[in-house]
Image (spheres, grey):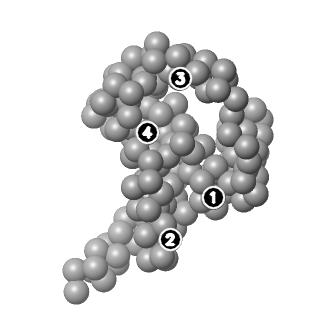
Amino acid sequence: MPEKETIERAREDARQGKSPSTQAGEFVREEIEHVREGKHGARSAKQAIAIGLSKARRAGIKLPVPKEGKVSDEVRRQAMRDSAKGQHGSQPPSPKRSRAVTAALKREGRQAASHLALSRQAHASARQRSAASRSRAAQKAVRTKRLNSE
């Protein structure tokens, strides 16, 4: 269950008209903090991010499901289930299952949320994008920066 502050920050982003990925970023940020403070671990930075995105979808953030071929069918189906739960609400997981997941995550390391691991993940993700896509994002960032500084 996400913290109240995280949900509130995401709602604030939504009110300001920010994109769903920006709203979901609040949940990813919370998950990285959980790993850093030792609440639980993660096998990789990618896993920590995936947990955050899953929580965002379940909280009702309208994140698109990954396209076919981008990720495994299993990951895609889970994202679809998370989105459906976020739109209609659902019952909480059974206590036994919840404890099992928490116990499994506690056995994982804390390095997944290190500065180095996150920067490597960001670099790897950026490398998969085209030069044109990265360029458009940079140009948009410049425009946004200019608008917000005025």
Disc 1 residue type (three-letter): Gly
Q: Quadrant of the N terminus?
A: top right
Disc 4 residue type (three-letter): Glu
The percent position of residue 38, horizontal first and vertical second, equals 34, 25
| Residue 72 seen from this side | no
Of labels 1 and 3, earlier in sequence is 1
SS class, disc 2: helix
Disc 2 residue type (three-letter): Ala
Tell me which residue sits at (48%, 67%) in the image: 11
Of labels 2 and 4, earlier in sequence is 2
Residue topped by disc 1: 60
Tell me which residue sits at (72%, 54%) in the image: 89
Residue topped by disc 2: 14
Residue topped by disc 3: 102
Residue topped by disc 4: 31
Query: Rounded to the nearest whole Å, what is the CA distance between mark 2 and mark 3?
Result: 30 Å
Of labels 2 and 3, earlier in sequence is 2
Query: Rounded to the nearest whole Å, what is the CA distance between mark 2 and mark 4?
Result: 20 Å
User: Callout 3: few (<14), some (14-19), or many (20+) C-alpha neighbours within 10 Å?
Assistant: few
Question: In screen coordinates, is 64 left or right of 74?
Answer: left
Question: In screen coordinates, is 44 left or right of 38?
Answer: right
Of labels 1 and 2, earlier in sequence is 2
